[in-house]
Image: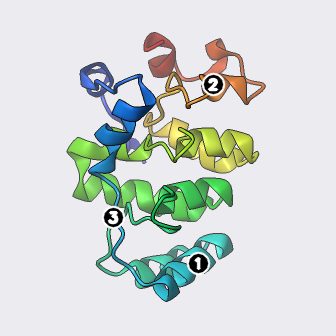
């Protein structure tokens, strides 16, 4: 996991638009929608079971950012792992995205859904503490990212900003 820590420079170079429409366009390049509904269902089943081996087998060559819901939704493997507190799946996804798409890692792991919730925000909303802590441990969470309602990670948690990793505190 230590190899997954990103430097402060990655955080500083990231320019995400604040306007929800512009933000949607910025992140749309990452969303894939190529799997059949049956395959998506099987991926979700593996995520809910938190079975990383089964998940990797079912993922095959599909995109890590495959949309698992309808065309007008954004619900990737990362969002599903956050919602179901699938720590093992999230760890596998983080390792894969870091290995295969390191330059895009921060954007992919902070990809907002239709209402602007990132996987970290979804972890907070669903009390998926283990999965959230795993994301924080690799320093891949932008805690200052605000959803469409203007809420950030700290709005949904009992953690004060000064209790979060030092890297993130420097970025506020």
State which mark lies toward you, 1 or 3: 3
Disc 1/disc 3 C-alpha distance (Å): 19 Å
* Residue 79 in which image quadrant: bottom right
Secondary structure at badge 2 equals loop
Circle 1 residue: 46
Position of residue 101 in the picture relative to residue 79 (left or right): left
Circle 2 residue: 151
Secondary structure at badge 1 equals helix
Image position, residue 133 (x, y; %): 61, 41
Mark 1 or mark 2, which has the lower sequence index? 1
Front-most of 129 and 64? 64
Image position, residue 9 (x, y; %): 25, 22
Front-most of 124 and 164? 124
Q: Dot 1: within a 10 Å radius of its alpha carbon, few (fewer than 14), some, or many (20 or more) residues?
A: many
Identify whether 4 is placed above or below 136: below
State which mark lies toward you, 1 or 2: 2
Mark 1 or mark 3, which has the lower sequence index? 3
Image position, residue 65 (x, y; %): 38, 60
Disc 1/disc 2 C-alpha distance (Å): 30 Å
Circle 3 residue: 32
Q: Are marks 1 and 2 in contact (CB under 8 Å)?
A: no
Identify whether 82 is placed above or below 4: below
Residue at image location 52% in from the left, 42% down from the top: 135
Front-most of 72 and 95? 72
Secondary structure at badge 3 equals loop
**Residue 133 in view (yes/no):** no
Colour scheme of this structure image?
A: rainbow
**Residue 15 in view (yes/no):** yes
Disc 2/disc 3 C-alpha distance (Å): 26 Å
Identify whether 109 is placed above or below 48: above
Identify whether 119 is placed above or below 169: below
């Amino acid at each position: 996991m230590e190899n997954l820590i990103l430097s402060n420079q990655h955080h500083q170079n990231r320019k995400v638009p604040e306007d929800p429409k512009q933000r949607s366009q910025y992140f749309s390049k990452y969303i894939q929608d190529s799997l059949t509904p049956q395959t998506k269902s099987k991926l979700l089943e593996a995520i809910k079971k938190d079975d990383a081996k089964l998940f990797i087998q079912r993922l095959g060559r599909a995109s890590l950012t495959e949309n698992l819901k309808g065309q007008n939704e954004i619900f990737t493997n990362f969002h599903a792992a956050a919602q179901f507190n699938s720590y093992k799946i999230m760890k596998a996804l983080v390792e894969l995205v870091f290995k295969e798409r390191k330059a895009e890692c921060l954007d992919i792991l902070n990809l907002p859904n239709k209402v602007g919730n990132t996987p970290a925000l979804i972890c907070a909303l669903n009390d998926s503490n283990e999965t959230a802590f795993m994301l924080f441990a690799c320093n891949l969470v932008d805690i200052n990212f605000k959803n469409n309602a203007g809420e950030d990670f700290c709005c949904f948690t009992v953690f004060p900003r000064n209790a979060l990793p030092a890297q993130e505190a420097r970025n506020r």
